[in-house]
Each structure stands twice: as structure tokens, then as C-alpha cells.
Amino acid sequence: MHISVSWLNRCLQPATLTADEAEHALMSLGFPSESRTELPSGDTCLDVEVTSNRGDVLCHAGMASEIAAASGRTVRLPEVPTPAASAEHASTVIAVENPDHVACPLFTARVIRGVKVGPSPQWLREALEACGQRSISNVVDVSNFIAMEMGNPCHVFDLAKLEGAKLAIRPARAGEKLTTLDGKARTLAGDEVVVADASRAQSLAGVIGGADSQVTESTVDVVLEMATWDPVAVRRASRRHAVRTEASHRFERVVDARTIEAAAERAAAMIVQVAGGRRCAGSVDVGASLAPLHVIALRASRCNAVLGSSLSREEMATILKRLSIAVSLDGQGTLLCTVPADRRDLTREIDLVEEIARVRGLDAVEVRTSIPVAVRPPQASESARRELGSVLTGLGFTEAVTFSFVSREAAAAFLPQGMRLVEVSEERRKAEPACRPSVMPGLLACRRANQHGGVRVPGGVRLFEIAAVFAQDASGRATERTCVSMLVDVPVSGKAASVEDRQTGLRLLRGAIEAGVRALAGAGAVVSLKEASPRCGGFDASGFATVLLDGREIGVAGFVSQGQLAAYELGAPAAVAELDLAALLACYPPRSMIALPPEFPGIERDVSFIVGEEVTWERIRGHIDGCASPMLERVSFVGTFRGKQIGAGRKSVTVRFAYRDPSRTLRHEEIDGPVQQIVESMKVGLGATMRT
């Protein structure tokens, strides 16, 4: 940001600021000067570095406010005589349409008739030239002057060149043509915002005006536009068309709608001052209602604790008022601070603490010779992640760290149904513009690198990664969550993976899931897999399931599809899982399962049930729990048998029942009845028969 010291003095009282004082004050406030140029006019131009969150200081009034807060001066803009308005009202001369208050929160138009366009007065030319700008004409120079002085970019249209005497804010039409003020003919993509007349676009909103309606020496009547625009739309249009202007630089950092009225009135008065003419009464303002100013509560005790100071509430209020922040006290002594419209960077209590530190000077912060340190245990979330990583590495997994960006094709394979990809500009990442919706592409690429590198591990390669994934729903709302992703090689005993090999791989994966989940949720956590249809094309339709923890879905597991195995050139199948880390962290720390050893022996009995292939262990377990005796201490799965003697489409599932009475020793005949009750329930509910 180029700053003229003479211009700063026009905004300050007393106007005695030197270039050295300006540099020192701005440096202490966090705005270092990158260069300093002495001008032939006797002025000094400072090139001041401004952070992206401080759009309010991209003007001389903003910089003057900062210097005033540090030096005790006051800010006062030079007065411009308010011209008398004609009886004709602006709304009868120009019509404005602004239906989208997100793209354009506020659009204002003022009309000045009878101007004489010509050279600017010397003071105006020198002011602009001191900041590196070229003088064009008196009317146009005023619009540039106001942007440099007050931070509100504006644009002036030749009223006679606006078809239908109308200004409409609308999306550009795909393929629409617009010749801009730099003389370049541009083809619009369709997602830009334009200011148009009744038939065609007349400016690229917030970026650059159009040549068709520019002010020339023949212009008589002008329309002064001052508005504020969606910073995302301005940034997108500026980058797409490779045009960066003083206006786009400011709008990308947000110009608050509440600052427009004063700046627009000043601009209109200055046009009449330097170009003559007569202003039409009033203005045409179309937009959303102005939001109330933001109020932040500041605790004096918190401020002193952060800064290590002993400031009183009154001292804090004095400092904040020097920054134009209105301050009042509530009943408990908290400072209620009303933030100025142009200070959008102030949103939280700590922001006000930083402002107090800046104005006081960082050299006023006490530097202690020793720092008290309190040793605290790690956060529960960090302890849980370490425990999970420890369990998985103990099971033979290797932790991977993969990149967050992938190609569109790789991302689409694992994009959940109904979701859309989150992408960055192709100019930044041509080959991999998509944020990963799953960690699977990264793990599969890592496994491919292992394979091509000849990596061989007994039992197969096992990988895991804890990382964030991204997607957006149909409405465009982005979601981000952290997942625990695992990949396990399916052990292949022959030339190709058999059904038994795939089952072995899935059991290995399921064992890892159960071990990891129970490490965080406790040994009593019930982990199950429920067969389902794949939610994306990257999974094999014949082997996909949702993972349930105590009946709640926490992730998915299954086999990688043949298409993805081929895409990553993998020679063997892989079983994968992706679990929601937040659901696991919510269960941590695990509940203790410590109990006194039993005083009396129990009795175990194995029973084999012949059921249909479609009957899952969860259904069997549910029937057992529904009719279990109080003496039933534990139910466990022993094994499954299939054979000719069982019959096609049937299987034998062996279940072990453990009974115990904590007050005495059981006899075998005492559990005959409870076991028979379970057998009968299985017959009725699942069509099971007891295998002898």
C-alpha cells in the first residue's frame, strides 16, 4: 500500500507528522515500511506492508487512524462543501436492480448532471501521483481519490451510454462479451457478477469497469456507483481474467456496507467541486438491511492475564477508544466494546487484547526471567490416537502419511453417493485438484509403491493412516472429518485368491478393527459388521459392510473393487476399512472391566445349531440374549462347519455357553433346562435344528 505523508497530514490534527514519525508509528503497530521514496513535490511515499485481514487500512484515513491511536492525534478529513441538490431525484433518472444480496450486499447510485470533464486540479493530480497513480480526468480521478482516501472503490458511468437508463446487477451470461477499461475484449464464463444496462454488461463487478460506458470529454451526465461485493466472486473473476486492480484488492478483503454512505456522499460532493454540475437529490440504494455493529465483551482480568499487565478498566477503555471502538461497562465490570464497521478483523475477546497490546507497544509487555510451567497429562484425544496407533502397529500395521490432494478420477472412485468433490483451482494443482473424499486412494498408491519396490512382509503388507477427508453435499456445504483407514493384503495361497483366502483377509481386517475399537471403547464394546451395498464404486459389491459399534454405524469395510486394483496395478486383493475417528474418541477412555475372580466354578456347554447360510452371528446372538437365563455368564462363537451331511445352503454354527452361580457350585442338570429353552427359541425364530 503506497501512502503519501502529505496526504496523511491532511487527515490528522495536528498536521505535523514527518516521514520518520510515520514509519516509526506504523512499524510499532505492525505495518512495516518496505521502501521510502522522496518525491519532487517535497512529499514522501511510503510502501507499507498490510496483512490480508486489515482491509480497513488500505487507505489514508485507515492509516491515519492507526497513527492517531499511537501518537495521540485526532483524525479529521478535509471538509468538502456539500452541493445543493436539484429538485430532480436520482430515482427518476436511473433504475437499479439488485436481486442477489449475497453477490452484492449493497449497491448505491447517485446522479450528477452537467459536469465538465477535463484535467484535474493540481492538488488532486499530485495526491494521486504521490501514490503511484496516473491522473486521467477530474471525474475519474475523484473515484480513484476516494478509494485511496477512504478505502471505498467506486465507478462512474456516462449516463447517456447506459441503455434504458438502468443498472442491473446480475450473473454474467456464458460467452458474454465485455471490453474493459484496459482495452481488452473479454469473454465471460458465466459465474462472474456484472453491472449491466438494459442489454449488455457494462463492468466486471468489483474488478474493472467497461469501456462502452466510460466517462470521456463529451460526457455531460454521470452516475456514481458505490457498492460492496462478495469477496469470493471478486477474487474468482480477478484470477480468471488475470486482471488485478486497486478495487479488486480492496473488495477481496471486504468493504463493509455500513461505510458506503459517508464515502459516497463525499465522492459526489468532490465531483461537483472539481467538475461542476448539479447533483440530483437523494440516491438509489438497493441491498440488504445494514447489520448492527458487532459487540464484544472484554474481561479486564483476562486481558491482564494474557499481557502480564495490571491495567485498569479505564486504561483499557481509553486505548480502545483511540481505535474508534466504543466502550461501555456492564454491571459486572466487563467492557462491552462496539467494533467499528470497517474493523471486520475484530471478532473475539482475544482480538481486543491484541489491539491493546499493539497500541501500548510490544516493548511494554514484561519479559520475565523465568516462566512457570505446569505439567499436565496429554489431552484425551491425543492419548486415544496414540493408543490406537500403538495397537495397530503392534498388529503389524505400518503408518502411512499420504497427500491430501488426488486426481479427480481417484477421488471419484471413493466419493460417497450424493456428495460432490471439493476442488482447488487447476492453476494451482493441474494433475491433482481434488481434496480426497477418502484416504483409500493414498493407501492404494502407497501399496503400489511398495509392490513396485519389491517389498515383502510375512503375512502381507498392512497399512493405516489417520487423516482428514473432504466432500460437499448437493447444496455446496463442505464437510471435513478425520478417519482411521486400514489396508490389509489378502493372503493368496495359490495362483489366484480363493474364497477362503478372501475370508481370511477379511478376518484379519476385522480382528484389527475390533482390537483398535476395543482399545478405545473398552473390552465390552460390541463390534459387528453388517452386509450392505457399496456407497461408491471403489469397493467390491460382493464384499462390503458397515461397521457397527454397540449398534451405531462408525464406518465401512470391504474389498477393493477389481477396477481399482487394476487402476493401481495391484497383483493381489486388498481388504480395507475406514472408521470415523470422532465416534471412537467419544468412547475414550475405555471403561474398566476389572472384577473379582469367581469363588465357585462354572459350567461350559457347546451346542451346534444348523441354520441357513443367510443367518448371521448377530441374529443368533440376539435370539440367545432374548431368552437367556440369569446364570448365563458368557456366549462365544466357536466355529462354523459346512459339508454334505449338513446340506446345501445350510451351515453348522457351534456356540459355547458359560453358566455360573456366584453363590454356589452349579450342577450339570441345572443348566439342561436353560439350554433347552435356547434351543427351542432358535427352532421357532431361526428355523434351527440341533446338530448331534
Image: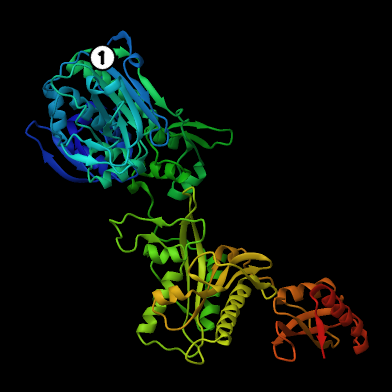
Which quadrant is home to the C terminus?
Answer: bottom right
Which of the pair 136/500 is nearer the observer?
500
Give the vertical position of 517 relative to 184 (above or below).
below
Q: Residue at x 27, y 38 (%)?
A: 176
Tell me if I can see residue 534 in this picture.
yes
Q: Number of labelled discs?
A: 1
Which of the pair 212/120 is nearer the observer?
212
Q: Position of residue 540 (x, y in %)?
A: 52, 73
For residue 432, which quarter of the picture? bottom left
Q: Position of residue 463 (x, y in %)?
A: 47, 78
Which of the pair 524/26 is nearer the observer?
524
Furthest-left residue in this view: 40
Give the vertical position of 183 relative to 219 (above or below).
below
Residue under numbered circle 1: 81
Secondary element at tag 1: loop
* Residue type of the residue flagged with mark 1: Pro
The residue carrying pointer 1 sits among few (fewer than 14), some (14 to 19) or many (20 or more) residues within 10 Å by Cα, namely few
